[in-house]
Image: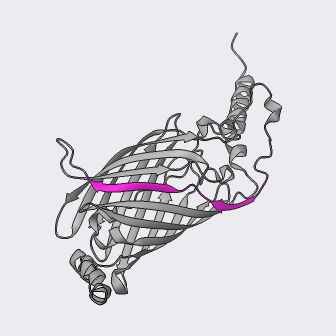
Amino acid sequence: MARPARDWLGIVLLTLASLESTPALAQIHHADEVPWYAAADTASRRGASFSYDQFRDPDTHWRADRVGLCFLLPFGERGAFFVKEDYWRFDTAGFAALERWPHAREIDLEDPEAVDPDWPGETMIAGFGRPELGLVAPLRLPLLGRGDLGLLVGLPIGRDELYPMSASCLAARVDWRRPIDLVADLQGALRIGWEGTSAANGEQLASSAYPDGPRFGVELGSRLAARRGLTVAWSARELAGGPHSRRLQITGWLPVAGGHAVQLQVARELGGKADRYAVWIVGLGWRLAGLPRDLEPSAASRRQFASSPLDSTSR
């Protein structure tokens, strides 16, 4: 016997209501890119960078402010080691991450009531994020040609309460970036990679809070070694379980005295509303160039300085 139209309408309304009340089963956690400019700019490989970034999500009213510091040391002719540390201030607007994504909570199967339902219990959370270290270096791949390798490892140190901006977890990312010379100072680039994150010794976050997956992106704009430039980039993260990120970013930089540079970034997240932690990201950076190689004391001059005054008097 066919159902009356009002019964079908009731079923549809109940289904829509249940979908609306079902919590999101996916999430994106924050992950930075490696400093690719260090492989192209010689001066940047012996310097440091300061940055301030603001993350905003109008739907959840989340807001995060970050102050970052990155030190770089040269490695080989075109490579660089780097060490990064961030300080975060995360305003959840009373809507905690595990309230939005309850599946990311670690559950004690023997005693589910042992888990604090109000964790972290703070609306405003501040603290240092996990330290990150890595390497940017040239790497030629068979059939693909020249490119740059980017490695990043996040140490399991920090505050889980800052999730999804940061957490005490072990993070690893590997990327390969292929610059493509076009015309004049215009350059494109393709990037592919993989990211994986594992929970450390936290008691609140489950392994599903850190989905793994491939990463890729495309860029078009000025050469990274140019004194001034503008780059438009599109990047994606395809993480296990369905969450994904689609980000459009514009980056511009200008030289200042002493070989330093100021940098401005504006990014718009285009991925799914259920996955993202921010819609708009605006950042201001200051790249501090190291001492030019031709001004660094040579090995011969250092030996001469070490042996001249004191050695002559001692004789």
The residue lying at 45 percent from left, 55 percent from top is 133
Of all residues, the one furthest to the right in this rendering is: 113
Q: How many marks can you see?
A: 0
Tell me: residue 136, above or below residue 260.
above
Q: Nearer the viewer, residue 13 or 203?
A: 203
Instruction: Find out whether residue 127 is within the magenta segment.
Output: yes
Q: Nearer the viewer, residue 185 or 34?
A: 34
Instruction: Find out whether residue 222 is within the magenta segment.
Output: no
Q: Nearer the viewer, residue 288 or 143?
A: 288
Q: Main secondary structure of the magenta part?
A: strand
The residue lying at 52 percent from left, 36 percent from top is 242
Q: Which image quadrant is residue 252 in? A: bottom left
Q: Is residue 239 left or right of residue 274?
A: left
Quick one: quadrant of the C terminus?
Answer: bottom left
Q: In the image, which residues are magenta? A: 122-138
Q: Residue 226, image x and y in percent?
A: 27, 73
Tell me: residue 155, above or below residue 45.
above
Of all residues, the one furthest to the front in this rendering is: 315
Q: Is residue 156 left or right of residue 285?
A: right
The residue lying at 73 percent from left, 59 percent from top is 93
Q: Is residue 11 left or right of residue 193?
A: right
Quick one: quadrant of the N terminus?
Answer: top right
Q: Residue 94, image x and y in percent?
A: 76, 55
Q: Residue 140, image x and y in percent?
A: 21, 48
